[in-house]
Image: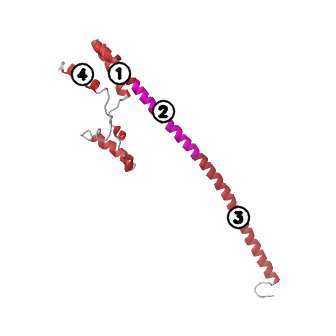
Amino acid sequence: MTEVIPASLEKLIQYCEQEGFMGYDPYDTLNSSLNFHAFGKLGPLLAIQIQKRNPVNIRGMIGIRKGINPKGMGLFLKAYSILYKKTLNKKYLENLYSDRKIDRVEEIKATAQEELDKAYAEIEENENKLLSGQKGIESGKEKLQEGKKQYEQGLKSYEDEIKAGELSISNGKKRGCIAGKE
């Protein structure tokens, strides 16, 4: 039993190194080239849940590529340091400081920075749209108030004309000029 664990660990380390420490994420379905948003609000949610529960890995068929997970890389580095402390085997120390992992970490940092820059640009764009929308709302409110004033002035003018007409009719009746009483 004790020999099985180190052998399994070595196989796992070999596999991870062969794959370049890249793998799939349970929620990577939306990285597909397919547009699941075309199926409405529930399309992306259903796609994620179907892929998570799918016993067959179809990620390659729908255009999802393996990626590097920053937390995963951190865990690999931590595991190599623990293995070195426990065994004092220099190969784990070499793996910990190998150029490939350092390059991967740099690659992850660069990718993360790109994603962060995109996110900030998107936030800034949305803030600008929001400010523009708020200005539009304020402008609309001002126009609404102006229209309301014009409406009230027109209504008052109309009421004044009606009163003047009623007064004119009333004066005409008093003089007997209306309805053939002349």
Q: Earlier in the sequence, mark 1 or mark 2?
A: 1
Q: Mark 4 is on which residue type?
A: Leu
Q: Mark 3 is on which residue type?
A: Gly
Badge 3 element = helix
Q: Earlier in the sequence, mark 3 or mark 2?
A: 2
Per the model, the C-alpha gap separating discs 4 and 2 is: 38 Å
Confirm or deny contact between disc 3 and disc 1 (CB under 8 A). Answer: no
Image disc number at residue 117 = 2
| Whether residue 3 can be seen here | yes
Q: Position of residue 46 (x, y in %)?
A: 33, 46
Per the model, the C-alpha gap separating discs 1 and 2 is: 24 Å
Residue 180, image quadrant: bottom right
Q: Earlier in the sequence, mark 3 or mark 1?
A: 1
Badge 2 element = helix
- Number of other residues with Cα within 10 Å of mark 4, as a class: few under 14, some 14 to 19, many 20 or more: few
Q: Earlier in the sequence, mark 4 or mark 3?
A: 4
Q: Nearer the viewer, mark 3 or mark 2?
A: 2
Question: Residue under circle 4?
Answer: 9
Based on the picture, tell me whether residue 149 belongs to the magenta stretch: no
Secondary structure character of the magenta stretch overall? helix
* Quadrant containing the N terminus in the rendered view: top left
Residue beneath the point at 77% across and 72% down: 164
- Number of other residues with Cα within 10 Å of mark 2, as a class: few under 14, some 14 to 19, many 20 or more: few
Question: Residue under circle 3?
Answer: 154
Q: Nearer the viewer, mark 4 or mark 2?
A: 2
Per the model, the C-alpha gap separating discs 4 and 1 is: 18 Å
Q: Earlier in the sequence, mark 4 or mark 2?
A: 4
Q: Position of residue 146 (x, y in %)?
A: 68, 56
Residue 129, image quadrant: top right
Per the model, the C-alpha gap separating discs 4 and 3 is: 87 Å
